[in-house]
Amino acid sequence: MKRLLFCVVLSSLIIDLAGCAGSMKKVDNEALLPEIDVVQVKENSDEALKLAQEAKLDVEALSTKLTELDNKVVLLSEEVSSVSSAKIEELENRLSLLVEAYKDLQAQVKILQAMPVTRPRNDPTFKPSSASDILNPSTEYDSYQNGLRSFNNRNYQEALKIFTSVVEQFPSGKYTDNAYYWTGECHYALNDFASAVASLQKVFTFKNSTKGDDAQLKIGLCYLKMGQQGLAKDEFKKLVDRYPASEYVTRAKKYLEELK
């Protein structure tokens, strides 16, 4: 009887413990799985979608600006390539004019420096003819300078007439070789490249002309303009070989590289 009573009490205790365990498990599960706020989740989702759309618009705007910048770069590149050749030639001509004027001043300074400071007593210390030579340049010099001014003002036809007149009137003058060079430049500016070559080649008939390397470079450029690359290459080689100290050697070598 006692044994039966013990078994009943034990069974009741086991059932109670099992019930407690089930309750604890339920509580634990409820703690692990909190209640989800559906409304809040939807609001968060809408906000994220809105931000994503704004970001997409920003990306599209940046992409448009990048395309515009690319187009501007292309346009600038085209402008640079289009003006480079003509503008460089114009600047080179202006530089040549400045060099020309500098050389003339140097020559005049050397003449003045070479003039004796003292003279024999039986010679006059002042001659009207000497003053006239200094203050009033020769007709050749005047004409030559007028030609340079016309060329600098892009009056190539007028400049051509003036330089042609100089070489005709003063075939052995101080500026004849330079005048031949500038007749070549005039023909070149007028796109008459064959006549330019003919004029430029006459520069070489003057020994020790200061325009030799200038003429050599320009002849090569004339042949390039005429599409005769082989002849142009030969002329640039002559420049490098004959005038190794010329300021144009670097340019000539660059053209030779491009013509390979």
Image: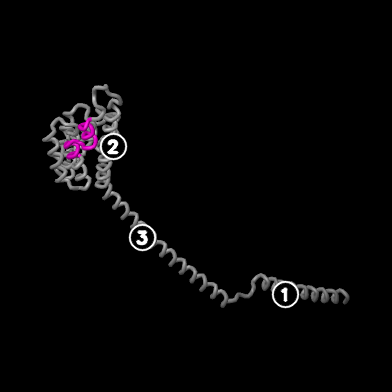
Q: Which residue is disc 2 drawn over?
A: 102
Q: Which mark is residue 23?
A: 1
Residue type at mark 1 is: Ser
x, y percentage for residue 40?
A: 57, 75
Q: Which mark is residue 227?
A: none
Q: How is the image coloured?
A: one colour
* 3 or 10: nearer the viewer: 10
Q: CA distance from mark 2 to mark 3?
A: 47 Å
Residue type at mark 2 is: Tyr
Mark 2 crowd level (few <14, some 14–19, many ≥20, 10 Å Cα): few
- The quarter holding residue 223 reads top left
Residue numbers of the magenta segment = 127-144
Q: Earlier in the sequence, mark 2 or mark 3?
A: 3
Q: Which mark is residue 68?
A: 3
* 164 or 104: nearer the viewer: 104
Mark 1 or mark 3, which is nearer to you?
3
What residue is at 25 percent from the left and 40 percent from the top? 97
Q: Is residue 229 visible?
A: no
* 134 or 9: nearer the viewer: 134
Mark 1 crowd level (few <14, some 14–19, many ≥20, 10 Å Cα): few
Q: Earlier in the sequence, mark 1 or mark 2?
A: 1
Q: Is residue 169 left or right of residue 12?
A: left
x, y percentage for residue 139?
A: 16, 37
Residue type at mark 3 is: Glu
Q: Earlier in the sequence, mark 1 or mark 3?
A: 1
